[in-house]
Image (spheres, coloured by chain):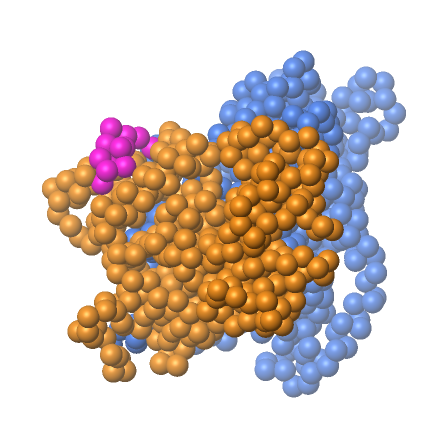
Chain colours: A orange, B blue
Amino acid sequence: MPASPGSPPSCSTPSPHIEVKGLELYYGSVPAVRGVNFNVMPGEQLTLLGPSGCGKTTTLRAVAGLEQPRAGEIRIDGVPVFSSAQKINIRAEKRGLSMVFQSYAIWPHMTVFDNVAYGLRVRKDSTSEITEKVNRALEMVQMREFGSRRASQLSGGQQQRVALARAFVFQPSVLLFDEPLSNLDAKLRADMRIELRDLQHRLGITSLYVTHDLEEALAMSDRIVVMRDGLVEQIGTPDEIYSLPRSEFVADFIGSANLIRGRHRPDLDCDGLTALETATGQLIYGMAYGRKVGLEMTVSVRTVHLRISQERPVGERNVWPVKIEKTVFQGDFSQIHLYWGDQRLVARCAAMEPIAPGRDVYMAVEPRRVVLLGAGNS
Amino acid sequence: MRSMESWFPAQKVVGYGVAAIAAVLVLYPVYFLLQAAFDVGDPQVRPPTAYGADNFGSLLQYPQIMLNTLTVSLAATVMALAFGSLMAWILTRTDVPGRRLFEQLMAVPYYLTPLLGALAWSLLGQPESGFINGIWRALGGQSHLIDINTPYGIAWVMALFEGSVAFVMIAALMKSMDPSFEEASQVIGASRIRTIMRITLPLAAPGVLGAAIFVFAEMLGSFAVALVLGLPTRYYVITTAIYQMIQQYPPKIQVAAAMGASLFAVMWAMLYAYRRVVMSGSYVTITGKAFRPRLLDVGRLRYVLLGICLLYLFVAVVLPLATLFFASLQKIAVIFPTAENFTLDNFRTAMTMNAVRSALSNSLLLAFGTATIGIVLMGLLAWLIYRSQLPGSGMIEYIVMFPQAVPRLVFAFGLMWAWVVFPIPIYATLWLLLIAYLTVFLPLGVRTIAGVILQIDKSLEECAQMCGASWTFRIRTVTIPLLRPGLVAAWLLLFIASVRELGASILLMGPHSKVITPAIVESWFGTSSELTAALALIQTLVVALAILVLVAVTRRISAQPVD
């Protein structure tokens, strides 16, 4: 093997567990992944999030070794498992990873016990060790009493738990998840989300998770990689991704946001705020968060950050009179559609007295909630 | 050297090794066939002294043979698909009583062999002496009711006895289809007929098209029925014409070769079309999520459907067997025999003939060898073609499917021509027949196993890989167990196909390596139809016994259901 800088450097910051650099993958001549870079730190849960066809599953499968990239490098513990430059492509079974599949892939010809024991038998553990580890794993996913059942006798949620136990029972260094909850119903999905997160913390295992479900990503991840068209749009903690979207795509895909376009008015900037004038002459103050401020700008305002009141609130900046178009009651909150000059905006307010359509009210937003998106986005 | 491993995995070595074996098996005889087809020199001299396309030009002198072939093959394919689809739908999708039993009985015509069917229907349907026409005249009818020695008579027998493949393929397809597709249609208010027309049939269409191509190829290459029923009226199809040209003196080797080469050129194009169909449709219907098939409640209609099942088995099983049994017990086979016409001499003669006994044991030995070696070879090939991402797997598929495009008789001719000049003396031995069987049944075995492979969700194998299992380990623990029903079916199909094989055997068997089916044909044309009937029944009985044993054994092996 060509010399590889395998041993982790002994500096204070831990070296990444998984490194993906310049990853490109084509299906025939169709690009699926077009140059993706990210790191997963030890014990971290990193989520690849994006709409279908964005290349997230392909990226995961490339890390797993189930797809062969055209270019780039993938390192695990500093050791390259794929490198187009060094012509390295370690087979999936030699990478020491484990994976939970979208379809669960529970082998129908084996019992639950045999399914879970498979990875241990591959590793030639002793029978007593296997029994002990499998039972402990089944215990952790609350499936202990189902050991002798067949896969076809299990419900979706149970199959999911077995798939999970099978994936972590042999103590892999990394767990990969390919939309593991997408086939479950909503209630079960919400429960499994918390369970999965707990389990991951208890095991302290590094995991790379793929989903198209925003809530899932926000609830479960240490960091999120938002992908689109085979490229990375933004990497950050759930809070960063949510609060400080970098592009219109991220702002729109992650939760509901109002996008407001305008022209920068440097002459009106003050207190570290950036002033923006919309086409209809409305003035809105926002924060750049260190991003480069161009001439034509777009800001993103989350629907929950728009405050609606009957009386004019105190303060001078970012307070406007608006007209109610309609209010949609949605249980925990009401969705208020309103006219802000010519532009239609949406606000979400905690359950409140319904306001009649056509009423004139006031809308306010804190300037720090008005996030300037990065320049160069359409 | 961790990085080196990826360049020499067992997977690639085995893959390319198996592919190479298949390529040699198929291409070596094809080369000699083509050599003969383009040989325009002195037919007595090998290797050829001159090459050209004149042999193909001379095919134009036989337009009637081409027309005959198309008529018979098309008619037989249409009939076989109609029977096969109807029966497959009835037996896999409706709650007709006794489905499981009928499903097993559906394979019986295939076990009986088209040759036996042709012999029986010849006794039944000849215009003068046929039993049915005898009854017709006894009831006051004029001349004859049916004439089996016609194109549609030939097609009828072919469809009944060679069409089982259509049923097997379509039934497998229907079983693997998620019933929720149909339920979804019914739930939104579509009638049953509409659901069948708009959901079931379109979903099944690629599979049915595949079956159609397969059956049509089978019919083009069909030999036994056309030989038995066509020869008396000198009605030749392409295979019987080729046989005639090779057997006559002096043989027309070159024209026969050109005829065969033209035939597989047509089939080559059809296989290309088939491949496009498979590639465009998704066959991944079994996922890790197990589903339970649900049956359609057809109400009163089930008794009509039951009647259809019974009728099919009557004309394809009961009637032929009864006819042969009836004929074999007579000195001269007639429909209304007198008491002194009955005799057991035919069976006595058949049992004491050494030639028959050795032919039968040779056939069983060969069938066992072919099936056992075959599922290993063909299972690996199917996996290689449809699952591995090894470069060149598309090319391998073409090569493997090639024998389907070549009538067995023609292929055997290529084999004969090839192995005569081969340095190891296997010509006229059972080894040559084994090689021939393994070659001509490649498409059958690979297609059968591939049908199951395509239905297994890829992630079931990938998951084993992610658990750290090597290729050989996951083949052993995941792929083979999941494929087991398919492998068992393939073994059975190969075994049966080998025992009933005629087209290749008739040219390749030597005086000391006789096999049963050609021996029966020799008896039909050489001795008496009554003795032949006895021979055919003895063969059938032995095969049936072998199959019963196999079914019992495979039941035990596959006692654990894979659902």
Is residue B295 in the magenta section?
Answer: no
Q: Is residue B47 above or below residue A159?
A: below
Residue that extends furthest to the right in the rendered view of this protein: B142
Q: Residue at x 14, y 40 (%)?
A: A132
Q: Left or right: where does residue B527 sit relative to residue B457?
A: right
Q: Quadrant of the image for the N terminus of chain A? A: bottom left
Relative to the observer, which residue lies in front, B58 or B142?
B58
**For the magenta stretch, what is the residue range?**
A137-150
Q: Residue at x 17, y 52 (%)?
A: A124
Q: Left or right: where does residue B456 sit relative to residue B180?
A: left
Q: Left or right: where does residue B347 sit relative to residue A208?
A: right
Q: Residue at x 61, y 55 (%)?
A: A259
Query: Where on the picture, by quarter, is residue B123?
Result: top right
Image coords of residue A311 (percent x, y): 59, 38
Q: Quadrant of the image for the C terminus of chain A? A: bottom right
Residue B290 shows in this picture: no
Image coords of residue B255 (percent x, y): 72, 69
